Structure formats: C-alpha cells, structure tokens
Image: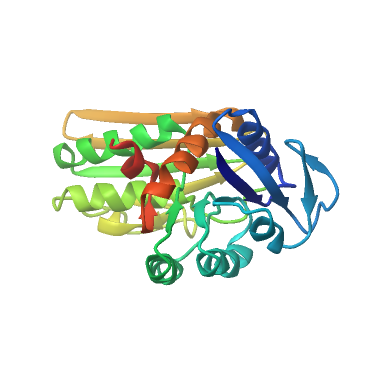
C-alpha cells in the first residue's frame, strides 16, 4: 500500500484530496499538513503544522495543493527527503520548474506538476493541439472561482503553449486601437490571446475557440465540482513512483 501525505490539507482542494486518498484501497493517507488548520480532521488524519510530519510518517508521495510561495521551498525539501511529489499548486514559473527538475532528478524521485487533474481538461488540451494546424486564429478563455489568485490559469498557459508549438502559421492580430486598455486580453505564445474571468459560482472552465475562413471550432471543458479532479489526482499518485525528474501535465502519465 502506497503511503501518501498532503500539503495544504486544510483548503477545499486539499481536504477533498485527503478524503479521496483515504477512500482508495490501494493508498494510505499517513499525514496531512496545513499550518493554518492545525488539529482539524482531514480524511481521517489530523492536520499537522509542519512539513516534517510527512517524513516522520514515512510518506512515499506527497500531494501539494498550497500556494506557489510555499510550494517553491516545500517541493525542494521533498526532493531532499527523497519523497515523490504530485503538484496541483499553480503559479510556478519556468525557473521554478527548472529548479524542481534538477532537485528531483538528483534525488532519483519524480515531481509531477499538473495544471488540471480533470481527465476532460487533459483531453481538451490534446484536442486543441491536434486542431491547431488546421486553423490560423485562436483565442482561449479561462473562467475560475473568485478565490483564485493567479491568472491566467496553468491550464490555459499550457494549452496555448502546445497549440503554438503545433503550428507556425498563425495570423496576426488585426487590432490597431484598444478603446479600453487590455480589452484584447494577454498575448501568449504565437500571439494567441488569453482571457481570464474570476467570478463567484464557478469552479474551473476553459474554452478554446479556433477559426479560419468560413468556420470556427469551439472546444470547452467545465469542472462544476472539485470531485472532477480526484480521479486524475489518484492516477498521478499511483503512477509517480515509476518515474524520475520533472513531469509537466497529466497526459504524460496517462499516455494521451
């Protein structure tokens, strides 16, 4: 049975992860950590204040759903402890990922950074990548709950990166004058525009719109409950011990 710990266990996502891990017969939740929710119950575990709790409990894998500022240090520490990591924390930079790759490769452990654990979102990114060479314009809209502090979402960023890499024939933006500053959104790789919405009542939603002469294609994925992420989290936890170094995206583990 694989022994698993959770960082950020007191948050909504972390608490949901704890419950999912505790319910899986192949996994054992051995430690939950969150300095802001010490002493509360999470999946049958009592939340501890310090990350040392996962090492003391013999965790082989730790799931991190914290914030980027905390994750940067905690993840390198996990590599030093020779503990695999599954990361749902967003806001990590390219420099952060390079540092994690070096740390985990050196420790012969793996760190899986997943912008979106929903299987449908993974498929959405793959479909957009496949469609990109057949269209010359595209824009991405991501919509999230109003407690998300970073924008755009990691899913939107990765989607645009993969679409840009899949085609080199994108048309230029025709906009010459913005009557409201920023109205065209942010310019991502290959000039693909990204728009972020933050609103109460939402969880996580992504829409890719591709267009060429005479036709458009819309690919959309909606997570309406955090439970949608749990099958992907469990799959990543079970797969990560067989890998080393940095892995970005759930699709690599699922061979999508």
Total marks in image = 0
- Which residue is at 28% across, 33% downward? 127
At x 37% / y 66%, what residue is drawn? 105
Q: Is residue 247 left or right of residue 213?
A: right
Position of the N terminus by quadrant: top right
For the point 65% across and 41% down, the residue is 29
Residue 155 visible in the picture: yes
Q: Is residue 129 above or below residue 6?
A: above
Residue 40 in percent (x, y) is at 84, 44
Place of residue 43 in the rendered image (x, y in percent of width and height, measured from the top left):
72, 36
Q: Residue furthest right?
A: 39
Residue 250 placement, left or right of 51: left
Q: Quadrant of the C terminus?
A: top left
Q: Where residue 65 sits in the image (x, y, percent)? A: 61, 50
Residue 212 placed where, x, y %? 19, 36
- The answer, for residue 205, to whether it is visible in the render is no
Q: Quadrant of residue 211?
A: top left
Residue 52 shown left or right of residue 64 in the figure: right
The residue closer to the viewer here, 171 or 1, is 1
Viewer-closest of 224 and 117? 117
Please say if 196 is above or below 226: below
| Residue pictured at 49% horizontal, 62% vertical | 92
Q: Is residue 80 above or below residue 255?
A: below
């Amino acid at each position: 049975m694989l022994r698993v710990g959770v960082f950020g266990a007191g948050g909504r996502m972390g608490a949901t992860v704890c419950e999912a891990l505790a319910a899986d017969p192949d996994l054992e939740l051995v430690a939950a950590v969150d300095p802001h929710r010490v002493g509360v119950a999470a999946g049958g575990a009592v939340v501890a204040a310090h990350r040392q709790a996962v090492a003391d409990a013999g965790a082989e894998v730790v799931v991190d759903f914290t914030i980027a500022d905390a994750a940067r240090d905690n993840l390198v520490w996990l590599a030093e402890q020779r503990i695999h990591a599954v990361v749902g924390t967003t806001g990590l930079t390219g420099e952060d990922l390079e540092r994690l790759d070096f740390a985990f490769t050196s420790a012969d452990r793996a760190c899986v950074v997943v912008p979106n654990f929903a299987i449908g979102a993974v498929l959405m990114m793959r479909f957009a990548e496949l469609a990109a060479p057949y269209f010359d314009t595209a824009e991405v809209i991501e919509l999230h709950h109003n407690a998300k502090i970073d924008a755009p979402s990691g899913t939107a960023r990765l989607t645009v990166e993969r679409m840009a890499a899949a085609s080199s024939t994108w048309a230029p933006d025709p906009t010459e004058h913005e009557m409201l500053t920023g109205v065209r959104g942010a310019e991502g790789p290959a000039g693909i525009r990204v728009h972020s919405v933050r609103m109460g009542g939402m969880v996580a939603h992504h829409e890719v719109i591709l267009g060429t002469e005479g036709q458009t294609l819309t690919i959309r994925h909606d997570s309406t409950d955090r439970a949608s992420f749990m099958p992907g989290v469990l799959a990543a936890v079970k797969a990560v011990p067989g890998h080393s170094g940095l892995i970005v995206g759930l699709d690599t583990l699922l061979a999508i």
